[in-house]
Image: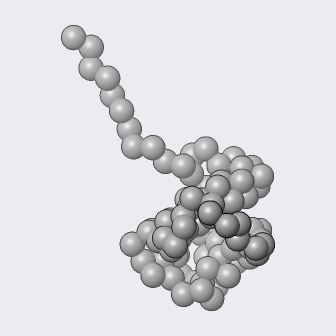
Amino acid sequence: MNTLKLRKWDSAEHLKTEQDMALYFEACLQEAGDDAAFLAKALGNIARAKGMSQLSRDTGLGRESLYKALSGEGNPSFATILKVTAALGIHLHAHPATSP
């Protein structure tokens, strides 16, 4: 019998371009609802794709702190989210919510 080897899916491996990253985050924003941890994890995936060390330098935040804050287990402040999105080149936009 052949054994099938599987490995854990890592979104960061598939985020190759700036457009990939922006579209991924946009999709996550639409899916997250009010799940802030989901969005933090999505930013963490993008950060790992771009390089956490560079993000640390660009934001002035410690690499370990970023890993924790963007793990989906942390609770980053909104200021941290704004620093991270700016450093990643992602802009947050607002538009009126549509009625259900």
In this view, the residue farthest toward the left is 1
Vertical order, 20 against 61 (above or below): above
Left or right position of 98 against 35:
right
Q: Nearer the viewer, residue 42 or 67?
A: 42
Residue at the spot 39% in from the left edge and 72% down from the top edge: 73
Q: Nearest the camera: 33 or 11?
A: 33
* Residue 40 appears in the rendering: yes
Q: Is 57 placed above or below 26 here?
A: below
Q: Nearer the viewer, residue 74 or 16?
A: 74
Q: Position of residue 71 (x, y in %)?
A: 45, 68
Q: Position of residue 69 (x, y in %)?
A: 48, 77
Q: Is residue 57 visible?
A: no
The residue sitting at 32% across, 23% down in the picture is 4
User: Residue 52 placed where, x, y %?
Assistant: 58, 67
Residue nearest the observer in this picture, 14 or 93:
93
Quarter in which the N terminus is drawn: top left
- Asked whether, in this view, residue 64 is left or right of residue 87, the answer is left
Residue 24 x, y percent position in the rendering: 65, 54
* Viewport quadrant of the C terminus: bottom right
Q: Determine which quarter of the picture holds residue 7.
A: top left
